[in-house]
Amino acid sequence: MKKNLIDFKNALVLVVGDLILDCYWYSKNYYVLQEQSLPIASISEIKQQPGGAANVAKNIAEIGGNAKIIGFIGTDNEGLILKKLLHHIRICPDLITIKQNKTITKIRILSDKKQLIRLDFQEKYICKKFNLLYKKIINSLKYYKILVLSDYAKGTLSNVKKIIELAKEMSIPILIDPKGVDFEKYSGASLLTPNLTEFEKIVGECNEEKQLLKKGIKLLSDLKLEALLVTRSKNGMTLFQPKKNPIHFPAKSKKACDVTGAGDTVISIIAASLAAGYSLEESCFYANIGAGIVVEKIGTETVNIQELNKFLNTK
């Protein structure tokens, strides 16, 4: 594939999904207190990042696209922090605050580039403001070229079928990063991007390449998808489309440090690429490069347009 410099400045993407605040507590002096077998981690640095659907919006902005993000936050300090983190010239946050809910927060404690433990706060967003959510989506869709649904099973997309219907009525392509064991609710989407673990939960274990290809083609047909992209970590990504041979994109990274948020990077770059007028094959090619860059970083990180173009220029 021809490797030109890429540009996403005209990409307009609407992101809807579960907003999460990702916190990273870094320790340089992790050790175990022998007499109590008690792990001790002296925290030297704390970092906060937009997570979940918020990370998708940030990824789009960092590569030069324009994203609007719709989702829920709680009435707490974590919600205020997440709002501030989304203050970006290329991000338009349209957030719904839910009373008596906490903002979903994940704290990861790391030492020597290894995650020791993850602490989760608030299991799901519980609210009755779905009509407001749908109204915001309807009012926004006409201004955007692509819709991304980022599902972390935290409640925002509990009626994802309705959102798919709204977008299809307006002929807006729908890209979905799925979650859970019910993929039927995503039927009719333009593109579904499960990782291999999520894919195998639906179709069964794939011990051979032939099995994966056969099951991928079947799932594509069963769900009436326009395309299916299975991300396979160190084995790259495989794209399925109706009446076309599957396309495999080998992994670009030789040293994966952390796969946290890699799926967000993939769907973000594909969405921005499609919104900018690139083909699906080109979009997946760029997304595969982006994934290779981001897995070499620690934590919920993003890829920027300079990194993408540097890779294209030097490889």
Image: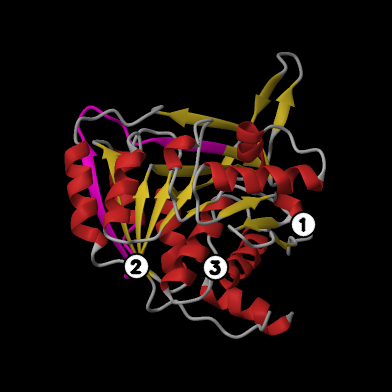
Q: Which residue appears at 63% of the width and 69% of the height?
A: 285
Q: Is residue 265 above or below residue 78?
A: below
Query: What amino acid type is highlighted by mark number 3?
Result: Leu
Whether the magenta-drawn stretch holds residue 41 is answered as no
Percent x, y of residue 309? 60, 79
Which residue in the structure is indicated by mark 3?
Answer: 280
Left or right: residue 74 compared with residue 312: left
10 Å crowding of disc 3: few (<14), some (14-19), many (20+): some
Quote the CA–CA distance across marks 2 and 1: 35 Å
* 305, above or below 88, in the image: below
Residue furthest front as drawn: 243
Q: Which amino acid lies under the numbered mark 1 shown in the image of this protein?
A: Lys
Q: Give the amino acid type for the residue marked by disc 2 in the picture.
A: Lys
Name the spot of residue 157 as percent of width and height, x first: 35, 39
Mark 1 or 3, nearer chain start = 1
Q: Given this view, does label 1 or label 3 mark the residue nearer the observer?
A: 3
What residue is shown with label 2? Answer: 145
Viewer-nearest of discs 2 and 1: 2
Residue 266 horizontal side relative to residue 168, left or right:
right
Few, some or many residues within 10 Å of mark 1 (<14, 14–19, 20+) = few
Disc 1 secondary structure class:
loop
**Distance between the Cα atoms at labels 3 and 2?**
14 Å
**Tag 2, which secondary structure?**
loop
Tell me where the magenta segment starts and ends, as one range.
86-108
